[in-house]
Image: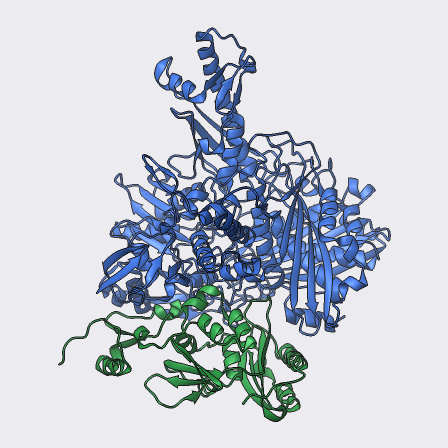
Chain colours: A green, B blue
Amino acid sequence: MGIEMKPYYRPLSLESYAYLLKKAGDKARVLAGGEYPQEAGEVKKGEVLIDLQALKLDQVSYQGDNVHIGGLCNLNMLMLACSGLPGLVEAVRHQAGTNVRNTLSLANFLRSGFVGQSSPLLCALLALDARILPILESDTAPLSNYFLKSKAVPITAELILPRSADFRFAQVGRSEMDLPQVCLGVLSLKNDQLRVAIDAGKRFIFTGDKESVSRDIAKLGSELDDQWAGSDYRRKALLVLLERLLEASPERKETK
Amino acid sequence: MKIELRVNGSDYSINAEANLNLRDTLRQLGLLSIKSGGCRLGECGACTVLLDGMPINSCMLLAVQAEGHELTTVESLGEIKDQGWKKTTGLDLIQEAFIETGAVQCGYCTPAMILAAKALLEQKSNPSEAEVREALSGILCRCTAYVKPVEAVLLAAKWLQGGKDDSFKLNMQVRPKLVDVDKVPLYVTVNKSENKLDAVKLVQGKPAFTADMQIPGTLHAKVLRSPHAHAEIEEIDTSKAKALPGVAAILTWKDLPRVVYSTAGQSDPIPGPLDMFSLDHKVRFVGDRVAFVAAETPEIAEKALKLIEVKYKKLPAILDLRDAMKEGAVRIHDEPEYVNFADSDASRNLPAEIRIDIGDVEKGFSEADQIFEREYMVPKVQQAHIEPHVTLSYWDEDDRLVIRTSTQVPFHARRMLAPVLGLPVKRIRVVKPRVGGGFGNKQEVLIEDVAGHLTIATGKPVLYEMSREEEMIASRSRHPMRVTVKTGVKNDGTITANAMYALSDTGAYGCHALTVTGNTGHKSMGLYVGDGEYRKAPNIRFYADIVYTNTPPAGAYRGYGVPQGYWPLDRHMETVARALKMDPIEFRLKNALRTGEYHPFSTAWNEGREPVPEVIQTVGLVECVTQGKQAIGWDDKYGNSDWHRVEGKPHLRRGIGVALVMQGTAIPYLDMGGASLKINDDGSFNLLIGATDLGTGSDTVLAQMAAEKLGVRPNDILVYSSDTDFTPFDVGAYASSTTFVSGTAVTRAAEQMAEKIKARAKMIFESQKVVVALPEIELINGYAVTPDGYKLPLSEIALDSLHRHNQEQLMTVASFVAPSSPPPFGAQFATVLVDTQTGAVQVEDLVFAVDSGVIMNPTTASGQIEGGMAQALGYAVSEEMKYDSEGVAREIDLVDYHIFRADEMPRMQTIFVQTFEPSHPFGAKAVAEIPMDGVAPAVGNAVLDACGADVIENPVTPERVLKALANK
């Protein structure tokens, strides 16, 4: 039996973090910035808290055409880092008011899962084909891998987004800042191709030209039904939003 | 573990559990300005602190995560200037701006807003309104509609830049427009925008609320709640939970005496069935109580809940109100202890029914040229006060049970709790500290018994604070209804008969079932009497069946049934007017009640008591319409096709709508308020009142009335409300009664006090050879003054009476019960922008012109109107509570149940049309509830005006708009 662990650590390097994680085993509870209170309340006595805040995971860097946003950046930092993506900025504003945006880390936002709840920001990130670099790993993975397969998102060291893109976002809620009944993010790709993410009771990603995406949306059926809105309404509203977002973008730029 | 924190420039070393969140840690340090809204997702922002200058939610971080950061709370900002011999720099200008603009209502979220403002102004000295709204968007406020807080931040910015002077003109929304219909006397303090007396402590975040009192050894309560909509508890095993270290008590139905009661905080006898037990062997909705736990920490209590083993036998559940009275429907209340009230019939799932006929309704219909009939639906909605229900109970040194609780009805609570807890009334003391919003939900004796039982069981102090999820699934809400309106009219627009039938869903228990639904008809259908001969003998029918279902109980919510009446009624009036091709306002006014006429329902109904016919003495409705039309630009917009279009956006349509409304002012011959006054050595006064200020500003308004009569400033009146041991009885804060009923009691006490002071002054004057007749003495600016200019300070009179000659304590007591309920009237206007392709509705403007009699305090009164309109805006477009096929709630937090944020509010304007109501000493009528009534129908009518979507169910959601457009 080794030396008893302290209840709280703030490692200064990834190596230290990996060591502590291994040592704490199933008692480890990683603190990756601010989190929703319902999750914060899950901390149990006896757990070893490993706080990542000294690992410099709250940095933003621009590398080539991409922006790398540290997982411990809060949502307001994400907004500032992505000023070249006004659609994303709008989605963040819809996601939460200032306090939550100042407190909630990107890593914990992604970890929360949003089961049964719509999320403008997640919709935008999926449309932007965001990739994440899980902590202690060297390979990035598409965010969509997790959400479309209902896999838990690991602690994110970095979120990687295009630095700028022809990206648009729209939503319909009962009020301007209500969570959406439907929302839709559209990323314009090469050759009139689109990547479209939808959050309308369930989440979908479609790629193709406008016509094929429209057809995909039109094909959606009862999977869009829930207590918040019916599939007929959602389908119709999504097609309207898609049309509008593309109309508003007559000279769509290509995203590399 | 040891945690090092730097807070407000000081270093703290704390021994705490590592899993303690920052909010609770700071509160343990005594920084009680930080509040808890019971959030799941950090949505309320009441726990805001500045972390390295940024406003964050302290519930979203563990305390250890804040090590190495600079924390700031509102306690560091400022304090009042004169702290005895110690002179301070005074309040921060932001705090002063919040006071000056009337931005403080309940004050629960005020420290958070002030910190957000501080962070903004340190980054941006001259922010735009949009930037201020953005900065406040993380803090939910249910009282103010953000109008005055936004103005406060803008004012603070001006002051911080150019010094505090009066050059900055306050927005009209802060100091609303007053238009006199009747002559309003020139008062000194009444009818003036005096600052709220409690605002100073609230901007400093002083420990004024229930949970701010910290007693060592306090246990924390939690409630195990039913996962089933309807079930018998067959077995319940608490042994594992009891064995958990730190658990002090677990109570189930087996442990408590079986006392049937109602949670409705109403006068005795409660006008409704007695159908509830503190704990029962049957559960009737998802969220119903199963067991109570008290433990050393909230976490232990939570863990204990999970260890209680319950075997349920599921029963069929009624989730749709239309199924409740069907043949063969399961009976929800079959307990033998059930006590009927009036026509309640538990065997039919019917806690109340109402049958009111005024005139000859069938004859009226037979005389009509046209008859219009339609069914409308109104939703269940939540009060969503930011401070949850919270109660602290403990035995005092005399073995009396003290219940410190966030309630609107302390005296009812004491009376009602006594049998439930098995204590005589005299052994219970209920103390109401500041209340962080209630809006009717705290007119319920909802959780006081939980803490009380657990204190009795353990002998220890017990704190029970509901979580937001519990608020959503297990407190009270507005009754949802299906309402049919049938109207007969002559072709000239004269209403010949008007009938309403309401099928109302009270949920699992019948609290307020009769009285809320009674008001649905009473205060809406009473507005339209018809014209000509029909005006003299109106034909009105209101029938209602109020049914039990296996959903969370409904109860009192600001407006108390009346918004449920005005959605169908006013939408119907619009339909009829349009069908008759009449101007919608002209049609309404043609048939509306006028001065000197009987309130038609006063001849037939009085909340389960004997009706007393009442003549309406003041109706400012026509002027309300005139003022409201002008403010919203009705004549330029209504019927103007150009205005309805949005250039370049053919899918967008503008619309304008109106609704006329009427409320009530207290319950006649029932609502009673008391007040006592005593003079102090320095000529100040203690005013003790049972009236409960739950953020409305009633303490201030009552002080203004007393001050007016005593010739002093309001801050010379030290108001204390409410404590059942010390303050006189008052029914509490509901039915828009405080200004009218308690205000009259205070005025009477002040008048008696003034007479005593004058008599004492005359004695002193005579001893000084100054001859004066008693009636000639006036009380002005803190002096007793003779016509010849001799004056005596009140302090001299007080010292004389207390110490020098024929000593006596000048003290008065008065009470008042209202013999009438003079209705306020209002004209609500709305403009909207409708997206005809997605159905999205954006409300752009709300204007409310209201006749609430003489306004005691324009700033606090307009705060009431704005806050009411904001809640009603949610009722109009976004708020509703839904349940799945198992009775599980869709909304369990304030994210799913969205209430408006600061950065999405429409423009708002309040206009007070002042009549002088002779039944009140200063001419006042009610303010607080009427703004709930008209917004939804005005918005519905505006949507119809915009695009022809005739939505019959509120809220007017995008999907409903598109469906209505498809049915055009």
Q: Please, which residue is most extreme toward the top here?
A: B769
In the picture provided, is B856 more to the left or to the right than B473? right
Instruction: Judge whether B234 appears above or below B400 on screen.
Output: below
User: The C terminus of chain B is located in which quarter?
Assistant: bottom right
Of residues B846 and B897, the one nearer the viewer is B846
Q: Please, which residue is most extreme toward the front here?
A: B162
Residue under the image location 38 percent in, 75 percent down: A58
Of residues A2 and B666, the one nearer the viewer is A2
Instruction: Judge whether B305 appears above or below B772 on screen.
Output: below
Q: Position of residue B581 (x, y in %)?
A: 84, 57
Q: Position of residue B513 (x, y in %)?
A: 55, 52
In the picture provided, is B777 more to the left or to the right than B661? left
- Can residue B467 be seen by looking at this rendering? yes
Q: Please, which residue is most extreme toward the bottom here?
A: A191
Q: Position of residue B706 (x, y in %)?
A: 51, 30
Of residues B74 and B532, the one nearer the viewer is B74
Residue under the image location 39 percent in, 26 percent down: B680
User: The N terminus of chain B is located in which quarter?
Assistant: bottom left
Q: Position of residue B962 (x, y in %)?
A: 69, 72
Total labels drawn: 0
In the picture provided, is B850 more to the left or to the right than B294? right
Residue under the image location 65 percent in, 34 percent down: B917
Of residues B83 and B594, the one nearer the viewer is B83
- Can residue B343 be seen by looking at this rendering? no
